[in-house]
Amino acid sequence: MMQPTPSPVPPAIAPARDFHPRTGDGLIVAATYWPGPMPDAPAVLLLHGNGTSRAAMVPTAAWLAGQGYAVLAIDFRGHGESSPAPHSFGFAESRDVAAAFAWLKHQQHGAPVAVLGSSLGGAATMIATRRRPKRARCSMPHQGRSRSCGWQAIIQRLRGLHRRPIATGCAFSSPGRSAPVASRVDARPRFAY
């Protein structure tokens, strides 16, 4: 286990809003929500890597919101502004994924939800999906090769969530930052469901 890495996160800029839901085991998870254009707009849950916070996901979240998606980014327990807790390499953090996914699914009136996790976010997503295998599909791109379906398939799944297309080749993270890149994919999200 690793020690918590709290860090300040800049306040959300409207129409996004910050809030602090509780997980099933009682911890507070800091979150930022960007509403979609409709109450039942498809949504994307963005999950950061180890030692960072939801602040790393703001550029990607703002871009996805501009494409017509509702977006939720959270701070995992022990990260950012969430309750202090030791890092568990995805095991305890999977509870945060499950709580955030359930909240977003309810908020969007049952609309499809994609989950994009980087590093710890991917590990926590994989563990969370093991608990709900009938509702989740995972893919795991790895160093330009995929163990299941690859980056293009993730883009296709996102396109299937919404009537507005997402440009092929947009990256949801790049080394050192999470800005969308409208060119070749340089870094890939680890999991999506």
Image: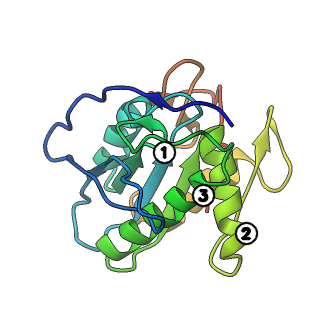
- Look at 49% across and 39% down and name the residue there: 78
Q: Quadrant of the N terminus?
A: top right
Q: Nearer the viewer, residue 180 or 18?
A: 18
Give amino acid for label 3.
Answer: Ser
Residue at the image position 23 percent from the left and 71 percent from the top: 39
**Res. 111 image quadrant:** bottom left
Residue at x 20%, y 38% (from the top left corner): 12
Mark 2 belongs to which amino acid?
Arg
Which numbered dot is residue 130?
Answer: 2
Circles 1, 2 touching at the beta carbon (< 8 Å)? no
| Residue beneath the point at 24% across and 57% down | 35
In the picture, measured across the screen, residue 32 lies left or right of residue 114, that is left
What number is the disc on residue 8?
none
Cα distance in 3D space between marks 3 and 2: 10 Å
Residue 100, position in %: x, y? 43, 61
Disc 1, disc 3: CB below 8 Å? no
Q: Is residue 49 left or right of residue 88?
A: left
- Could you tell me residue 131's position as x and y percent? 68, 73
Query: In the picture, which quadrant includes the C terminus?
Result: bottom right
The alpha-carbon separation of the residues under discs 1 and 3 comes to 9 Å
Q: Closer to the camera: disc 1 or disc 2?
A: 1
Instruction: Choose the circle earlier in sequence order: 1 or 2.
Output: 1
Tell me the SS state at disc 3. helix
Residue 152 versus residue 110 in the image, above or below: above
Q: What's the CA distance linking mark 1 and mark 2?
A: 19 Å
For the residue carrying disc 3, how many other residues have a C-alpha within 10 Å: few (<14), some (14-19), or many (20+)?
many
Query: Circle 3 is placed at which residue position?
Result: 94
Q: Disc 3 or 2, which lies upstream in sequence?
A: 3
* Mark 1, residue position: 76
Front-lying residue, 29 or 167: 29
